[in-house]
Amino acid sequence: MGTNPIRRAAALGALSLALCVPAHLPAHAAPTAPPVPLGGTAAEAAGAALVARRAAAGAAAGGNGGLDFRHCPDVEELPAPVRCATLRVPLDYARPDGPQISLTVSRVIATGAGGAVRQGALVHNPGGPGASGMFFPLTAGLPGRERIAAAYDLVGYAPRGVGRSAPLSCQDPATRAQGPTQVPADPSPAYKRQRLAAARAYARGCARLAGAALPHYTTLNNARDLDVLRAALGEPRLTFMGASYGTYLAAVYATLHPGRVRRMVLDSAVDPDPRRVWYRNNLDQSPGFERRWYDFRAWAARHHGTYRLGATPAAVQASYGRVLDAVARTPAGGVVGTGELRAAYLQAAYYDDVWPERAAALAAFLRGDPAPLTAQAAPDPRTAAEAENATAVYTAVLCNDASWPADWQTWDRDNTELARRAPFETWANAFLNLPCASWPVRERQRPVAVGAQPERLPRTLVVAAERDGATPYPGALELQRRLGAGASLVTETGAGSHGVVGGGNGCVDRHVERYLLTGATPGWRVTCAPHPEPAPVSLDDRAASARRALLPPVV
């Protein structure tokens, strides 16, 4: 968040991102289907190839990249020189001439500054699934992006289901803007039954509102759409930068189309092991977020003189607990209960640039001023529709992508065990994903066997933070292994913010820039020292702290 617009956009989509399975995971944790054949069914693969050929032919004939870029609609809030277009793709690639959907695309042309030679289009996906990348061309104006913006057209898009790209919804967005919600730290059997019923109702809502389109929101279709976008841009090979879920999308694309990959930056890597997608992956977020929650508390303790929350992580936890108990009794501002509080402080586990304002809000509340906490944690009606859409797409893609346990007993056993040592986010994460237990799609996808591509990939660049909670570091090691000998891994040691590129680490950004501009990677595995921790902001200087983060929906 803070000064990183990529993080801001990803926050809506990055509600709960996949990661590696811990060695201690219970044996009963997940049923896993064998990997899907490369390209899906024969009909889907043939349809995807046909649509991509048509897009490439249109690009060659049109001289405009195959896309009609014009002034962006006001709803996109994208100023000049950004231009927007729409890309038509099949809802179902097995029926390439059947029902079509439109994906929104944004672009800013390479500046050519300093005599730079244009290298084509750099396409970005910020993750989720459920986040829109339409904002990406705006990053051309950020400090440090000048050389990349000089050489590349920066292209963003909203994947299927997101924003105005055949938008998916599962419930009335207005219900997401209501508060407060009270989520117990140690849910009772009765509360669990309530959440199970709510998850089933949510899944039914997805089926009711999406109808026959629901099964077609998948990672495989996202990868097919990406290939059509590449072709429509007139690019023979794809240059791509993906964050979080965007790394999994990239890995699937590279497996399906290794000969169409030019360069790929994979930032904050999802573990692509088919045995982990997606139930097991999500389980491991609990200990990952617990580590990052500790990092925030340790930072606040080191700045006890500023915040007075306690001189040890345990003391800071006790201060947070007092606030938790208080809003359980009387919601802050009438709208912030324990659910809203947890969602706000989950952001501290994602991004350390929100630490000063989160610590200041706790301190202010304990001194009798609930206003900062209310401002940071209250649901915002203005983003309710966007948040609902992001959650719907996230849920549909993950539920469609793989098999999930259908019996509640498995979920209850696994998450009860995890919650004993990682209480901060375990149950909230479980309840978020619980619609997948009763997902109303009969035949779900089987995860692609990432790394089984028939030919060697060109050099790729994986970037990861060592203490990332949303996509823990072992996933980066697994992704590098599966991408092959040409994959290089840059690790930000001792840091844990989710989304490393553009996050204030000059060492990381230099490696990324050099790779995008020259294709050169820094070696098999290299490390960068962590970016500086945020400076404490006193209550008196609270207005100067980082701007309010865009919070994910309360679950």
Image (cartoon, grey):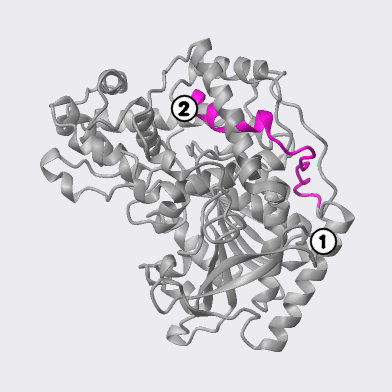
Name above or below for residue 274 compared with residue 320: below
Q: Position of residue 221 (x, y in %)?
A: 71, 55
Q: Is residue 21 magenta?
A: no
Which labelled disc corresponds to residue 372?
Answer: none
The secondary element bearing badge 1 is classed as: loop
Q: Earlier in the sequence, mark 2 or mark 1?
A: 1
Name above or below for residue 131 compared with residue 365: below
**Residue sitting at x 35%, y 46%:** 381
Report the span colored magenta: 426-452
The front one of 213 and 336 is 213
Q: Position of residue 310 (x, y in %)?
A: 22, 22
Amino acid carrying label 2: it is Glu
The front one of 527 and 196 is 196
Which labelled disc corresponds to residue 425?
Answer: 2
Q: Position of residue 100 (x, y in %)?
A: 71, 65
Q: Position of residue 239 (x, y in %)?
A: 62, 68
